[in-house]
Amino acid sequence: MTLSFGQNGVFFMKKALLRCKTCGAEYGADRAPFRCACGEPLDLAWNGFGIEANERCQSRRYAAFYPFAAGEWRSLGEGGTPLVKLETLAKELGLAEVAVKNESANPTWSFKDRGTASCIAHARALGYTKVGTVSSGNMAASVAAYAAAADMEAFVLVKGNVADEKLAPIAIYGPHLLRVAGPYYELYGESLRLGAERGIYFMNSDVPFRVAGSRTIAYEIAEERGFRVPDWVIVPTSAGGNLRGIVNGFEDLRRAGLTEKLPRFICAQAANISPIAAAFAAGAARIRRFPDNETIAHAIDNPFPPSGNRVLAELRRLGGAVLTASEGEIVRAQADLARCGLFGQPASCVPLAVLRRARADGIVAEGESAALVMTGSGLKYTAAFAAHRLEWRDCDLASLPAYLK
Ligand SMILES: [Zn+2]
């Protein structure tokens, strides 16, 4: 089905609301409130729906789910990533289906492009010419790339101790790249405060339109399966925005009458930094700051996730679970996925590690189906190669025939 929509962006922004699921407060999306006055994150409440057939790019295919006019999007072709079925793994785990949503197929090789595209459209609708983010990884590269495509000025703030080689893949897009000394956890709030003052739209990890961008992951998983949702969707979780967006996306589809039920969700964390898992296990309503441990799943090493409380509430509301994986289990999952032809960064492989745990614990039952969100490319974190035993051999041309026997 297709819905037509007009060219007047202001008309759409006035209709769209941002809602706090925690205290119920509502804000107009014609401003840029990044968090609720109660301190919790906001979700886009939007009743539009419709799917543009034969359109691969999410900002056109699912445009009717968003409150933007067509001219506000600056797409690089985000979304439309493959859902790859892994039959050998499914058989081994006793499941009807194990499918990997391969988000490394996005323009800057991670799921972040979906939320960045949505935030850029929102920033443009509100008349911003400057955008920013706080990240030294996937989100930083994504914001720098999309700002370049939209001809906007970008400010990327990274941790004081980030190595030079991690900065080059961000700097190549030409943003103002600032390595900021001082406590990293204060940068999130400080950037939003300074952004409001200086007219910079900071599209940080769990701001409303970044979360809204993640909804298309749910739309695509459902659509690919003929609008039958999988029993389980497993999402590697750092700030919590991606999981919130995917939950909202499946709820949109059900509300639109396109699907009959919701999947159940598993929040997947590295055991070494697992503040959401700790609070979930303790029955707590609020997360507590976790020790700043190391993990190979570097892209989800967030000791105090800004959407942590909200993720806890959503999982309890929907009968979900939070599971963790050890460093060894993450490395094994990365190798297993690579043997299936999928090379994800370690954080992206935590869902497979957690699925094994969920099968062993009986949380995921025999014969069920699971979709794993592989959030970013393995080439983003080449330091992980050192955790694997990778082999090659040398030979000379004359001895080559013997080697190829
Ligand atoms: Zn609130």
Image (tube, helix red, strand yellow):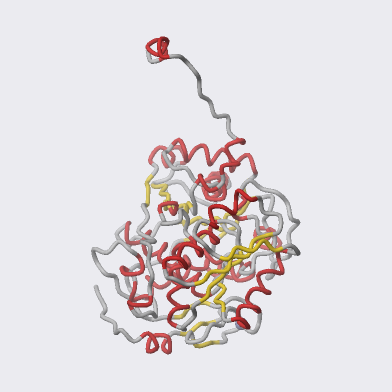
Q: Position of residue 336 (x, y in %)?
A: 49, 37
Please tell me which residue lies in front, 303 or 205. Answer: 205
Name the residue: 54% across, 57% down: 170
Q: Position of residue 240 (x, y in %)?
A: 58, 64
The image quadrant that residue 92 belongs to is top left
Name the residue: 46% across, 71% down: 248
Q: How many marks?
A: 0
Q: Position of residue 341 (x, y in %)?
A: 41, 39
Q: Is residue 274 above or below residue 52?
A: above
Q: Is residue 347 above or below residue 16?
A: above
Please tell me which residue lies in front, 199 or 231. Answer: 199
Q: Quadrant of the C terminus?
A: top left
Residue 122 visible in this rendered orientation of the protein: yes
In-image side of 77 versus 178 (left or right): left
Q: Quadrant of the N terminus?
A: bottom left
Please tell me which residue lies in front, 223 or 78. Answer: 78
In-image side of 365 versus 402 (left or right): right
Residue 250 visible in this rendered orientation of the protein: no
In-image side of 10 versus 202 (left or right): left
Name the residue: 42% across, 38% down: 340
Q: Position of residue 96 (x, y in %)?
A: 39, 46
Q: Is residue 352 above or below residue 404?
A: below
Q: Is residue 366 above or below residue 188?
A: above
Quarter of image, ligand 1: bottom right
